[in-house]
Amino acid sequence: MSRTRIMLMMSAAIPLAACGADDVASPGEGNIVVVTPSTPAPPPPPPPPSGPAPSTERFASITPAADCPMGTTNDGTIDGDDDGTVDFRICRIGGTITGTVRLEKLDGVVYSLNGRVDVGVDVGGDGLAAGGTQGILNIDPGVVVIGAGTADFLVVQRGSQLNAIGTQTQPITFTARANFQNETDGSGTVNEDSIGLFGGLVILGRAPINDCDGTATGGAADCQTEIEGTSGAFYGGDQAADDSGTLRYVQVRYPGFEVSTGNELNGISLGGVGSGTEISYVQVHNSSDDGFEWFGGTVNGDHLVVTGADDDSLDVDSGYVGVNQFIIVRQRAAGGDHFIEADSRFDDLPRSDPTFANFTFYGGGGSTDFGVLIREGIGGQYWNGVITGSAECLNVADQETIDDGMPDFQSVVIDCPTAFGSEGDISAADIQTLFNMGANNDASFTTSLTDGFVNGPNEDAVTAFTDPSIDTVDYIGAVDQAAATPWTQDWTCGLFGSDDQDTGSATLSCLVTPFYG
């Protein structure tokens, strides 16, 4: 990326006007009900592990705004480079957003989450919950939203929307404050193993799930449950086409937090999110838990990237049924569990039945876990895929998954020391039989990928699978060798295994700031 174009990405803000002692409003639009946190703000996160030295390049001077927009709190400035010439005004906001609020891009201003920030008040699975109020948060291209610690995260409630619509050259970035503090003394540098520096995104909807509180029936309007990592935030309902907004050209960097064992904030948690929602060109980088986790729902996605997740990169549960195509997952050597962990709750309906098509899973080296783990009676379609870099490529954990879920593999190639394994009641031979039922699958493949995720001649020689539910392409994997430029260009980071490398497909650097490569 040219520095000129990168310089255009260096800002984010929220023009808001006062609406009273407790409310602030965007002119002519909605309001934010400011809620004072019940507990003190968390201390700054500890310095991340040592890693590659930050860039020492100097850039043109940027003068921070003199003050924050009305309705936000001035938290001073932070240094955005290594010599004090590029500073940003930090404008803090918290509470509950109702009505329609726009985060406009303004020079010298960065938007900061203050604790848990809710978009809207939950309307319930049937849309009739007492006190339910819609909030719509619209975010302009190039805006940067930061969190100082793991208690800072965004929750989009049922019936509300987040429209974070960036562009290829001006992606929207949710990241940690430590991502671009003063580099002179090392207090703000991050490296390829930095994880869990802010809370992440939680998006909730009214689409069907199978994990119900009480005696409700799966998929019914009253089938709901509380999302992981929060309190009082519910998802589920009977609106399959529910619309929770749009994420397009968005990065979420260094998110995730383990509240308690098995109760974590992920990079992006999707609870009961419906098919009216758009998720396209979205990356999660270095989550301390999962990258994307789907808790039921019907939302589809395309051009998804997960790099460096410390747990599962893609996690499916609670009756998720959706189609995701063009997916890159890179595990880092120092952490990571499964490329996919897919569950369903056995006989509960709706049964999880995801489709993952045109995927490339690579990296790792330090992990001894399974690449793809499928269990609990889940179905699913796994088409046009490349799996490599894990100690074991494919694990199916129980007989019911084969008998009732019947996962379908078509044009999938795997290159691991061990191709198949089981942690449950079936044998590796049974899994191989299931795998061999599909066409053009190869469990003894030798990958020829370049840059880790771009097809080489061996991948391009495999016949692609086609189906009406996915875009028709003539290649397996996420990125075609014949592509003039990969779709990752200009808006992703960390795809090469080192956060300070920004060559090859011209990805952004994750190491320094959200703005400089």
Image (cartoon, helix red, strand yellow):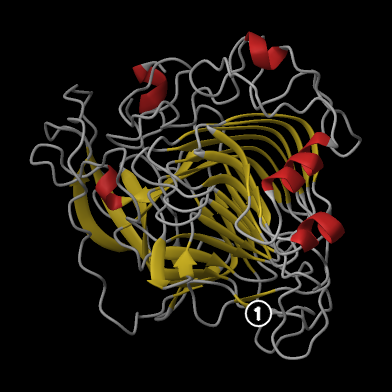
Horizontal and vertical percent position of residue 63: 22, 37
Q: Amino acid at mark 1?
A: Thr
Kindly give the residue lying farthest to the right in the view shown: 468
Residue in front for this viewpoint, 91 or 492: 492
Q: Secondary structure at mark 1?
A: strand
**Residue 68 visible:** no
Q: Position of residue 6 (x, y in %)?
A: 39, 25
Residue at horizontal 37%, vertical 49%? 254
The residue lying toward the viewer, choosing from 171 and 493, is 493
Q: Compared to 512, does 310 lie above or below?
A: below
Residue 347 picture quarter: bottom right
For residue 277, above or below residue 344: above
Label 1 neighbour load within 10 Å: few <14, some 14-19, many 20+:
many
Name the residue that disc number 1 marks.
Answer: 225
Residue under the image location 80 percent in, 54 percent down: 402
Residue at horizontal 85%, vertical 29%? Answer: 439
Above or below: residue 278 compared with residue 350? above
Q: Position of residue 137 (x, y in %)?
A: 57, 58
